[in-house]
Each structure stands twice: as C-alpha cells, then as structure tokens.
Image (cartoon, rainbow, N blue to C red):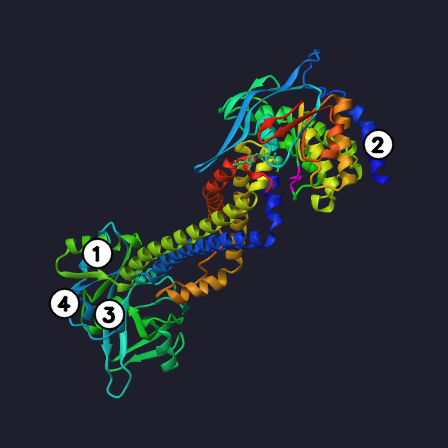
Amino acid sequence: MDRDQETKGSRDRVSDLSLGTREPLRCSTGAAEANPAVVARGLTRVYRRGAETIRALKGIDLDIQCGEFVGVVGHSGAGKTTFLNLAGLMDRPTEGRLTVLGHDVGKRGAGFDALRRKNIGFVFQEFYLMPTLTAVENVLLPTMWGRGNGEGRMSNVELKGSKHRAEELLNLVGLGQRMTHKPSELSGGEMQRVAVARALVNSPRLLLADEPTGNLDTLTRDGIFNLLLALNRDSGLTVIVATHDLSLESRFTRVIRLEDGEVKNG
Amino acid sequence: MIWFILGFKNLIRRPTRTVLTVLGVAIAIAVLYSLFEFQQGYQSRLKGELGALGAHVMVVPKGCPYEAATIALHGGKWPRYMDESLLDKVKANPGVAEAAGVIMDAVFPPGGQSVIMLGIDEDYMKLRPAWKLRGSWFTSDSSIILGPSVAEDSKLEPGDLWTLPEKNETLRVSAVLGRTNTQDDGFVFMPRRTLQRISGLEGKLVLILIKAMKVDQTDALVASLKADEVDMNVFPLSELLGTISALMASTRVFVSAIILIAIILGGVGVLNTVLMAVFERTREIGMMKAMGGSRSDMFKLVWAETMLTTLLGGLVGVGLAVVSSRLVEAIIRGMIPYAPKGSLIGFSLPTMLFCIGLSLLLGLLAGFYPAFRAASIKPIEAIKTE
Ligand SMILES: Nc1ncnc2c1ncn2[C@@H]1O[C@H](COP(=O)(O)OP(=O)(O)OP(=O)(O)O)[C@@H](O)[C@H]1O
Ligand SMILES: [Mg+2]
C-alpha cells in the first residue's frame, strides 16, 4: 500500500538521522540508562475561573525515563493536555515538584523559553502550521527566531545547515516531494508530518505529542504513529504521546493512565 | 529579518484589508505632503510676488492717508506736496532697499480724455522689475514713456511726437510700456524734472515709494520712518501685506490642525486593523511561541508588520500626492482667498523623506499596543483545542 510504503521508507531513513554532526536526539549524553526525562512529585495544577476551581491534576507522581515511548491515556478531561503542557514548560504547576530534563520547574519565574526551544518539540492535534509558509519554511520556523540569552545570531553557515536539515527532516517524514507546498496544498496526514519535522528541527531531547492523530483517519494515523515510534526506536528520542485512542495503547513501551487528574496504573 | 518576512507574508494574506489600511495611511500622508508642500510653496511664491510688487511702503504728505493712497493709485490732482529733500532722508534709512520719488499731475482737457502724468527717474524702474519697455528709457528731458492703454488710445509708437493738451508742450515717445495690468498702463511717464517744470512744482514730490529690505519687516520700517519725520504719512502700500501675513499665520494653524487630524485618523485605523489581525491570529501566535518564539519575537513580528503597512502607506501617499498635485492645488486655491500664481505643490525630496519618516513613526506608535498584546498571548490558552 502506498502509505505503508511511505512509512517504511521513512523508517529506514530515521536511523540515518542519528544526525552525523548534530548531537543525537537522546535525552542525555550520559550512558546511564536510568536517566529521568520527566519527574513529577505531587504535581498539581488547579485552574481558577472566577469562583470555580478545577483541579486538573491532583498531585500525581511519575517518572519518565530517557528513551521511553510513553502513552498518556485517559478520557476527555482527565488531565492529559494539562500534564503535557507542564512537561513541555508551557505552563507552571500550582503545587508539587516537576523536573524536566534535569531542570526544576517552579511555580513561576521566567527563563524556560530558551530551554523549551532547544530541548522540547511539540506536535498538536491541530497541526498549527503557518498558512503563509511552505512546508520547508514551516519546518525552519523554530530555528529562525531571535535567539536571546547569548545564543547569538545564526551565521550563514548555520542557516544553510538548518535549511539542509529541514529538507532532510521532510525527506525523513516522507515529504521530500512536498517541500514547497503550502499547508493548504497538503493533506491532513501530510500536514502532521510537516509538524513532526518541525518539532524535530531544533534537535529536541523530548518530543511531546498531544493527540497527534486525533484529526486523522486510521490509515494516516498509523503512518504518523509509526513515524513517532521509529523516531523513538532508531534515534532514542524520548516521546510522550497523549491520546484517548485505545487501539494505540499496546504499541507504547509504557502507558500512563490518567483518570480525573490522578494516575491510575497497576 | 524573520519578523519582516512573516509580517510581509501576513500582509499579502489579506490583500483587501491590507490595501484599505495602506490606503488610509496613504491618504493621510498624501494630505500631509500636499499641505506641507503647499504651505512652503505658498510662502515662497508669496514672497516672490511681494518682491515683484516692488514698493511696500508709501510716503505721502500729511493728510488723509487713504485719500492720498487712492489718488496715488488711481491718479488725480494732488492736494499737497512734500519737499524733495525728504527722499534723501528716506533713502538713508537702513530698512529701505530702494526709494523712488514721484511727482504726479493730471490735465483734464474739456471733452477729451484726462491725462495722468507721473514724473519719475531710474529709481522707479527698480520698483517695477516686471516692466518691459518697447523702445528705450528716456533719452532726453522731453522723452516720455506711454502706458499701453494710453498708447493704444492715441495710436502712438516709439519715436512719435505727443502733445500735452492744455499746456504747450511737445514730447517724444521713447518707449511704450508692455501691459502690466496695473494702473501704470494708463499713465504717461516722463522725467521727474520735466514734469516738475511743466507743473511749476520744482523741488516737490507727491509721494515716495519704498521697497523694504525685508518684506516681513515692513511694519518695523513704517514705524522707523514715522519716527524719522513727523511731517509725513507713512503706510504700507496696500492692506494686502497685512492681510496676507495674517492669512499665512492662520493657514499655518489650519494646516497643522488638518495634518494632525489626518495622522491621528490614519494611526487609529492602522492600530485597529493590526489589533484585529492580532486577535484573529491568537492561535497562530500562541503556536509560534510554543515553537520557540519569545515574547520579544512576537512583539517584533507585529511591530514589523505595522511598520511595513505604514511605510507602504507613506510611499503610496507621497506618490499619490505628487501625481495628483495639480488637482489638489486647484482645490486648495478654490478654498483660500488669495493665492499667488505659479505651481505651489512641487516635488521636494526633504518633504518626501519627512513624510516617509513620519509614516514609519506612525507605525512605530500604532504598532506598539497590538505588538504588546501579541507578546502577551499565552501559548497554552491560544492553542487549546475547543
Ligand atoms: N485553562 C483552563 N481553565 C479552566 N479549566 C481548564 C483549563 N484547561 C483545562 N481545564 C480543565 O481541566 C481538566 C483537564 O483538562 P485537560 O485539557 O488536561 O484534559 P484532557 O485530558 O487533555 O482532555 P481531552 O482528551 O479532551 O483533550 C478539564 O476538566 C478541563 O475542563
Ligand atoms: Mg487534551
């Protein structure tokens, strides 16, 4: 089948992406296997809307190791997105401790932007591609921002490097023939592939995907899922996927089940 | 650079809106450019015109100055005279650029046309830079120069003889004056001494015409001349000067007000559009933040987009103003009581640069709040799926 072919093709190339000159996509360069990517202790997130308070996460404890391919599953409203936002440094815990890639995430305080940019890749259910940019430009976008905190300006060589890398990533996700297409000229599955490539462009050590296949048909869903799986298996990238698609559960290396803001695992 | 590229792409994304916003700024800038140029053109043309007018101040013997002025301008029998020695005093005043003593007389032949004669010398020519003579300046004491109306009526040409009615004087036409469309057209000019002799007014003058060193200091000159000599009436040749000065001052206020309003309207239009665009793109901006864009990246992005819009508006506006300058000029001319001849709205690089600079400043100001709003968008709220 066409799509399977495509997936297989991409899978083969993932190993090439152990990225010669770039640092590997691994969570830590240290050899030790027991190397936590995300550690939560009593992690709590309370939303306040006027008088109403919603306890989306009720003090969860969990450990996610480097190199894991973790599924965060649970019903709608269980707190999956809330957890991913916290792990992705897009949100702050209300209470409890959270350590991401060795950095303590407190209740407040700035300074996580650069960390997030350099280390964390995101994929969303709605692909959020820039409609004005081509596929390759979308992939490049995260590398283009003015880089604060002494990261300096990107040199021409670096710029060429990122362009090359963006093309490489699009090849990897099987979109070598769609480089200059605008999102409106791509299918849903193709858009999500672009989003995956974009999430990888800064060589993240942690990939977070929130319902990455929620908007896709079964066949396309498998393609994307296999891509994430291949990334984890071949490059050692730590991947956390939030999903309520039960059929995918068996394919994760580990499943974290959330229920009403609490971890319900055996 | 990325901010400008993304900003530019956003502008192309909604062409109609962009065109309308740009047009709003363009119109404001076009108004600014036109009025600015007009103001400058008006002032310099007016200065030129006042210069061409020659005399700015008139000195006449004591008496009702306005009666005197009327007679001076339209001709007639002069009731009073002043001494020629006054001319040297006037010329000695440091505010005086040129001064010409004039004697005037008229004859009224029964049943015929009255003849108004002006006795002048070379000094008078200096106050009439626009004069064009067909023929030559006085060649002898008995030379005359005819105003074009007189020459037409009498069908005389340079070289012909002219007899002064009532007095037994025959004079030779040395030149015919080209049409000036002033009262000069109806005068007969002759050397001052000649007219003084004919009229028996040796050593007398009826008026002194003065050109001031500086047009805008005419009032000061009038005051100082008055202080010099109590026995004269000194007044600006025409109320025009005062009227025009006042007009210039009031147009300056008027123009500034219009410019201010146009710019504020343009700025508010831009602010509104950009703010709307920011709200519309909340998700997109949140996504860009999630993808590593910082607060300052979002700020710069929106700012760049705003400045691109207003810069474009500035360029289009200046172009518009230059292209439509004839039309705008005609409209403004119709609205103000007095406008000098000649083109008033021109092509001036400093004004253009100023306008374009101003459009950038406008973008800077109008973009600030929307940019701030964009910078404050929280990614998790923006990209939450509904
Ligand atoms: N910004 C917010 N303000 C208030 N309540 C919120 C906010 N975000 C989430 N919640 C609430 O927190 C709870 C957990 O939401 P969350 O989005 O984490 O669920 P989820 O597991 O991702 O669900 P879904 O599968 O539908 O995406 C829900 O009850 C939700 O209504
Ligand atoms: Mg969710």
Say if mark 4 contacts mark 2, CB within 8 Å.
no
Q: Image quadrant of residue B100?
A: bottom left
The residue nearer to you, when weighing A243 against B265, is: A243
Amino acid type, mark 4: Gly
Was residue A127 drawn as part of the magenta stretch in this picture? Answer: yes
Q: Could you tell me which quadrant the N terminus of chain A lies in? A: top right
Q: Are dots 2 and 1 on a single chain?
A: no
Q: Which mark is residue B142?
A: none
**Which residue does the numbered mark 3 point to in the structure image?**
B72
Chain bearing tag 4 is B
- Secondary structure of the residue carrying tag 1 is helix
Mark 2 and mark 1: span between their CA atoms?
100 Å
- Along the horizontal axis of the image, is B204 left or right of A254? left
Q: Secondary structure at mark 2?
A: helix
Q: Main secondary structure of the magenta part?
A: loop
Q: Which residue is mark 1?
A: B222
Kindly identify which residue carries mark 2.
A8
**Residue A53: image location, x then y, percent:** 48, 34
Looking at the rendered image, the disc whose residue lies closer to the viewer, 3 or 2, is: 2
